Image: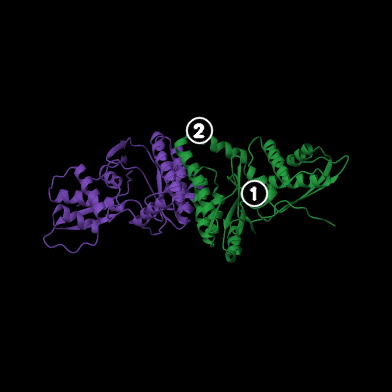
Chain colours: A purple, B green
Amino acid sequence: MAIQHRVSVTVRKKRRPGRVKSPYINECLGAMGVRATVYVRSQLPSSSGLGSSAAVTVATLCAINDEFQKGLTREEVAQRAFEIEKKVQKGRASATDTFVSSFGGVVLIQGTEKRRLPPVNLPIVVGNSRVSHNTSLMVEKVGRDQERHPGIVNPILDSIGAITREALLQFQDLRALGTLMNTNHALLDALGVGHPALTRLVLAARSAGAFGAKTTGAGGGGCMIALAPGKVRGRVAGAMRSCDAQAFMTMLDIEGARKEQHE
Amino acid sequence: MAIQHRVSVTVRKKRRPGRVKSPYINECLGAMGVRATVYVRSQLPSSSGLGSSAAVTVATLCAINDEFQKGLTREEVAQRAFEIEKKVQKGRASATDTFVSSFGGVVLIQGTEKRRLPPVNLPIVVGNSRVSHNTSLMVEKVGRDQERHPGIVNPILDSIGAITREALLQFQDLRALGTLMNTNHALLDALGVGHPALTRLVLAARSAGAFGAKTTGAGGGGCMIALAPGKVRGRVAGAMRSCDAQAFMTMLDIEGARKEQHE
């Protein structure tokens, strides 16, 4: 799902632009065959499991598309952004991140099939453990464990799949959704992609009144999210901060990438 | 597995004994058809997931057997103790608890098949969360969830089964065993039989240097156990105490029920 916290990217044509540090932005400029300066402002912590690279990539492509009148559709932006993520991340990219960054909302992607879900009011608190993590290492670790202990790992993955399917049926019921998030968090922990700092945040969020809480992203560090009744979101954020986390409240975004005018 | 902490029971023939509070001891006296006074001293916290009721039942039957010269074998004691546990706990009893209390050691019971494992040096720290729990409620809860969400719950039970089988292969390797305990703890949490106090103790034990730690018994409260290198057991126990738990160090017991002489 997309959240309302945004990345803003401004692109200006320029014959001899300076060097760009971000490999994502470099790939965007290369793929679109343009030269430009790129300014990024982000409300999202990077490398923390919130998919900020997908947001940067989609926003950069949209801004290039606009500045250079390339005429790409939103679908084409989403597709190119996914390919760029895949290239930079050496094959390991989630099509979900780039899709929801482009279109907003909640989407279930299985193979090539995309299913958009009706938007609901999802009051979320994000907690950033500030523990650095590495998506590739986490994905490799699970793959290795799966080869060595298929009898242990495969059923855990099956159960996580069943939780996702069940969550689709309970999507209007925040309490039921929270319980499923709790189960999911424990299963991610069982998979070895948890971190004590994340579990402490999850426990703090629940005891402050959240319906449920779980690791988000690749795990091993980064962020967790809590689903909490509107009234107690502040308390949940406070509980996370008292565990040394950065915390912010957000909601489902249904707009996706948009053009903003400045000055 | 049996641990070295013990329950001591003294039985003396008496024509008109006083009333006995413990339903386990009452059932022992009834099943053996005797009248006696029964004195109990226990090193185990009761109702905490350590199987103290099995220990009390086995010790009481052994003491009656001795005082009244009933000539029961140890196998018969173990079998009667299991039947008494089943009766008092309304059908929900573990044959493992009464078996290891009788014989000591480590045993795997599947259906009617018992497999004894070679004894190993297992340095254990027990942490009692002092959160009261209810075995029947926990067992019922899992059963109910299993009916409602078989796709989520059954794979978790499958994975726990695979961990048990894997643990049998790794039984000499404390580090590997600890990792399996950690996975198992997370899966018990996913099953809904965890408790935040137990997870806090588990995290504290691991960060103090334990190889691994997990909830023991029915969960939902009660005790957890940590497997820790001999040198750091004191530190692990200290970490648990700083989380408001009672903690004690123990080892595998290989003796089981024994006769002790007093005065």
Instruction: Examine the rendered structure and indicate whether residue B152 appears above or below residue B182.
Output: above
Name the residue: 53% across, 34% down.
B144
The image quadrant of residue B93 is top right
Q: Quadrant of the N terminus of chain A?
A: top left
- Find residue B23 and report its horizontal and vertical position in percent: 74, 39
| Residue at the disc numbered 1 | B50
- Find residue B227 and report its horizontal and vertical position in percent: 57, 58
* Front residue of this view, candidates B77 and A85: B77
Type of residue at label 1? Answer: Leu
* Front residue of this view, candidates A74 and A228: A74
Local packing at callout 1 (Cα closer than 10 Å; few below 14, some 14-19, many 20+) is many
Identify the element where label 2 is drawn.
helix
Local packing at callout 2 (Cα closer than 10 Å; few below 14, some 14-19, many 20+) is few
Left or right: B127 as drawn, with respect to A66: right
Left or right: B185 as drawn, with respect to A9: right
Type of residue at label 2? Answer: Glu
* Front residue of this view, candidates A41 and B196: B196
| Residue at the disc numbered 2 | B147
Task: Identify the subunit bearing mark 1.
Answer: B
Name the residue: 62% across, 38% down.
B136
Left or right: A240 as drawn, with respect to B120: left
